[in-house]
Amino acid sequence: MKLDRLPPLRLLSVFETVLRSGGVQRAARELNVSQPAVSQAVRLLESHLGFALFDRRSRPATLTEGGRLLARAVSEGFERITEAIAHGRSLAAGAERSLTIACTVGTATYWLMPSLTGFHGQHGDIAVSVRTTAQGIPRLLPGVDLAIRYGDGNWSDGAARLLFRERIVPVCSPALFERLAGEGFALSAPLLHVDAEIANWMEWPAYLAQVGLPVPARPGMRFTNYVQATQAALGGLGVILGWRSNAASFLSSGELVELPLPAVVPKEAFYIVTPRGAAPSPLIDWLIQAGAELEAQPISQSRTAAAAGEGAAQVT
């Protein structure tokens, strides 16, 4: 394909930032421009492509089918460019002591970055880089020293060590919780879905089947990553499946609360994967300790305890 047929790189970059950050407002802050400038860039990209990327009839706007296709391609493309640059820098740096972690956007945002707090104070000689992917399993490509993955731990490209086990339960904003409580917890609010494209990643149909509840007729809202869906949940737009790794801090702060529905502990878990024969690292030890502390945290005593006696929850 000729390069002149491709949209300008700056427009694709703005689109990628909107997806990764979870919205126009956050993208504007990250890019240090105004919100109208971000919106205009997205519309210019749509004009260049000849099709809409977002369905603006919903609030917040959701990706169209064409938007989802481009989102996947742009994410993979920028990921490969980032990998190439990082690899080139690592080759140029020579003996500089650095480590690169690959993980999903949600894991980086809600678990990894908070878990790294304090690491640099004890290991200031180790430079840590984080490389995120919006879709699929993080890979051990050249320049990546370790990956954080969700699955059964059996991967052929590296050695896996258990990081932490998950716990999944529906969560929502306190305001939406009060509304649902008034309805006797008939789950009439939209369900927030994440198109994770990761094998064995539990989504709403699998959760509802496991706890013996029917899939509601309403389609709900769909997002390309957990960051976007979480922002929608915080805004009271629906109910999301709360994973221990992603929702724990919001449950502790009271920004999200658990519904009185069964929690599920999947057989899959999060693992640290390193190339076989890789040298020991204090970073790996640090993260495994952080994972153990996450598992040891008590289950959030949110409003579910008081609501549990109000009757069995239903999904409509």
Image: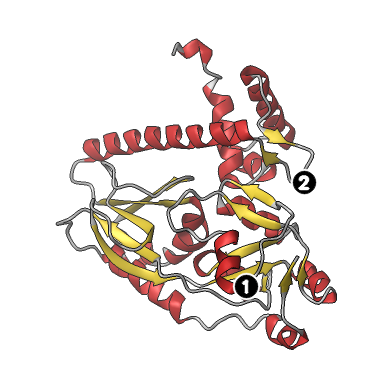
Crowding at mark 2 (Cα within 10 Å: few <14, some 14-19, many 20+) = few
Q: Residue at x 66, y 44 (%)?
A: 23
Structural distance between the alpha carbons of marks 1 and 2: 24 Å
Q: Residue furthest right?
A: 182
Q: Residue at x 77, y 46 (%)?
A: 59
* Vertical position of residue 206 compared to residue 225: above or below: below
Residue bearing mark 2: 59
Q: Residue at x 35, y 74 (%)?
A: 289
**Residue 209 lies in quadrant:** bottom right
Q: Secondary structure at mark 1?
A: helix
Residue bearing mark 1: 251
Image quarter (top left, top right, bottom left or bottom right) of the N terminus: top left
Image quarter (top left, top right, bottom left or bottom right) of the C terminus: bottom right
Q: Secondary structure at mark 2?
A: loop
316 lies left or right of 68: right
* Vertical position of residue 184 compared to residue 81: above or below: below
In the image, 124 versus 50, the foreground residue is 50
Percent position (x, y) of residue 268? 40, 66
Percent position (x, y) of residue 301? 63, 83
